[in-house]
Structure formats: structure tokens, C-alpha cells
Image (spheres, grey):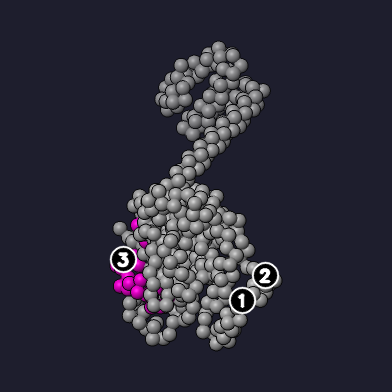
Amino acid sequence: MSEYQYYEFTAVDRPLAGRERAELRSLSTRADITATSFVNTYEWGDFKGDPRKLMERYFDAHLYLANWGTRQLMLRVPKQVLDPATVARYCRGGSASAWTAGTHLVIDLHDEDEDGTDEWELDGHGLLASITPVRASLAAGDLRLLYLAWLRCVQSEEIADDEPEPPVPAGLGTLDASLTAVAEFLRIDPALIKVAAAGSAPPVSDEPTAAQLRTWVVGLPPRDKDAILTDLITGSDSHLRSRLLRRYRDAHRTDTPTPAAARTAGELLATAADLRTERERRDTEQRERERIRREQSAAAARQRHLDTLAADRPAAWRRIDELIATKKPREYDTAVRLLVDLRDLAERDGDSGPFTQRLAEIRATHARKPSLLERLALAGLDT
């Protein structure tokens, strides 16, 4: 049985040096390696490298996809823009974990198909590109990715039912394209996200206005302003803008609920299950309404067809005789369909006697045509 494994790594903050690309080449002769990426697909065998070590040393984002249901996403950010203690509040199980590596923090999100169902026609190309923007948002203070990571742990039953949820970031009910891509890639239950979003404040603007930033900057201590200008001029901080936006958002954060009002993991799961049940009930009702509508439409069309046939019954009988006379199976089929129409018309009009007599005459006249008789029997026209 063939396999499919897709590995992709991306360098965001800095390009890879020639020496580093040579080191990566030693891990795979088939990989597509550039100054900012490493991509390889396996249909047999396994990757010789350790994704964790590659993330610690070279890359800022990694995506792994396998047709047996395994999915993995890693993101690396500098510790100066994301407090490891904050991450630890959300990444609480095998589905979401994190560790520090030098000046960076690596977040590892993982999902296994619980049913063990093989997935076919997979293609990982483009998935990481659609997800990578969440890294910049996270560095700028948007913690929705971390909350989704916690939900992934809840869904995988790695969080105790009585454990309260961490602070819910604002805007959870309006996920952008990259966060939606994360949720879909990790197969987080949409019902669970919807239930969790009920405890989320309305979204804040992704970009504060110039006037808002100006007011905030004016209020910063002089020493902070000096440090910001120095980093800006020297270019020593590639995340300066994200770090400042994060600081701004931290100063204006409206996360809810408070710890006293926080829901538990078990409550979220139970409410999500109720939501799915209600949605399934509505879907079932909708399908039933559609079935009834189709049946009514078909019945109305059937009556219109019978009305047309009633306008000239003799012509229909003549047509049946002509079709049977051809002695061709295909024409027999058409003749039988016409007979069924005439039977239904007779039953509708409460006048089955003439039809029954004409049918008996046909059966007697063509008693030596077993193919025709067989078709009549299959159509319920054997009596």
C-alpha cells in the first residue's frame, strides 16, 4: 500500500546561509531546498531529519501531513515577543506543547485521526503558506492561536473535565483566513469553536489607528522610546513592530471571561455536543422537507403527464401495438412504460375495467413472446 508524507519547513525571520542549505541537503537528496524553505514528499521511506531540531536551528514554521491521519504544525517565535508562561497556560497536552530553544520558543500542535482512517488524494503544498501569517499575529499579541491549541487538547480529551478554560482572546468568533486554516488543518470541531466563541469579546481592530498609536507612544517612558529608536536604527530586532503592537494590545486587552466566570473543559464539550445534536436535528428536518418537496414535485409532474395521456387514449393504445410489433426488446420496454401509464390513469379515474380487458387481450395475442411477458410481469402487469 502506498504512503504519503509531506514535510515543509519555512524560514521567515532570516534566510538560510549556503552552509546551512548544505547541511540540510545532507538530510535529503530529493528535497526542494531554497534560502527560505525545505519541502519534501515521501511515498516510501521516512525523513532522516528530526523536525524538532530543524525548528530549533533553522526554521520558523513547519507542517507535516501523512495519509494515515497524522498532522503536525510547529511555529517558532522569539521569547521576547511571547512569554513562555503565557503559552504554558494554553498548551497543556500531547496535542499542544511548547519548549524553549535558546532565544526562541517552539510551539508544537499535533492531531491524530482517532478513527485511523487513511486519507487519500492529499496534497500539502500551499497549506503552510496559508497558515504562516498566524505567527506574526501571535507575536503581535493575538492569542487566538493558543486558545485553539487548548481546544485541540480539550477535543482530544487531554484536559480534565473540571479544568477551567484559560483567558478567552477577543475575536474568537471571527477567525481570519490563517486561523481558519489552522482550525481546519488540526480538525478542531467547529461546534466546539462556536461554543467557546460565546465567551469571547468582540474583535479588536487588527491595526490600531495612527491617532491611537500616537497617543500611546506619547505616554511611553522616555527610556522606552530611546530603546525603540535604537532598535529601529540598528535593525537588531526583526520583530520590533510585532513587539510594539503586542505591547499596545496588552495595554488595551479585553479578554473574557474572568477566572471566576471561566467555563470548564467538560462544560464546553457538553455544550458543543448539544449544539451538534441540534444541528443534526435541523439537518435531518431539512432533508425531510427536501424529500417531501421532491416527492410532491414528482407527483405533480406525474399528474400532468397522465392528463396529457388522457387526452388521446386511443393513440396510446395504437402506439403500444406498433412497439410490440417490432419484436425488439428496447421497444418492448417503451410499450410497457406506456401500459403502466395507462394503468395508473385508469386507477386514478376509477375506470380500470377497460384497461384490464385490453391488457388481457395483449397478453393473449402475444403469449409466445416470453421477453415481453417477462417485462409485463416485472412491471406488475401480469394479471
Q: Position of residue 329 (x, y in %)?
A: 46, 32
Residue identified by numbered label 2: 212
The answer for how far apart the CA atoms under marks 2 and 1 are is 13 Å
Q: Residue at x 63, y 68 (%)?
A: 207
Position of residue 33 relative to residue 359, above or below, is: below
N-terminal-most mark, 2 or 1: 2
Q: Give the residue type that dot 1 points to.
A: Leu
For mark 1, give the secondary structure. Answer: loop
Residue 35 vertical placement versus 170 (above, below):
below
Q: From the image, tell me which residue sits under label 3.
A: 44
Q: Quadrant of residue 253?
A: bottom right
Asked whether residue 358 appears in the rendered view, the answer is yes
Q: Amino acid at mark 2?
A: Gln
Disc assigned to residue 220: 1
Q: What residue is at 41 percent from the left and 52 percent from the top?
A: 163
Magenta part of the protein: which range?
Answer: 42-69
| Disc nearer the start of the sequence (3/2) | 3
Q: Is residue 244 above or below residue 195?
A: below
Q: Badge 2: few (under 14), some or many (20 or more) residues near its Cα, within 10 Å?
A: few
Disc 3 or disc 2, which is closer to the eye? 2
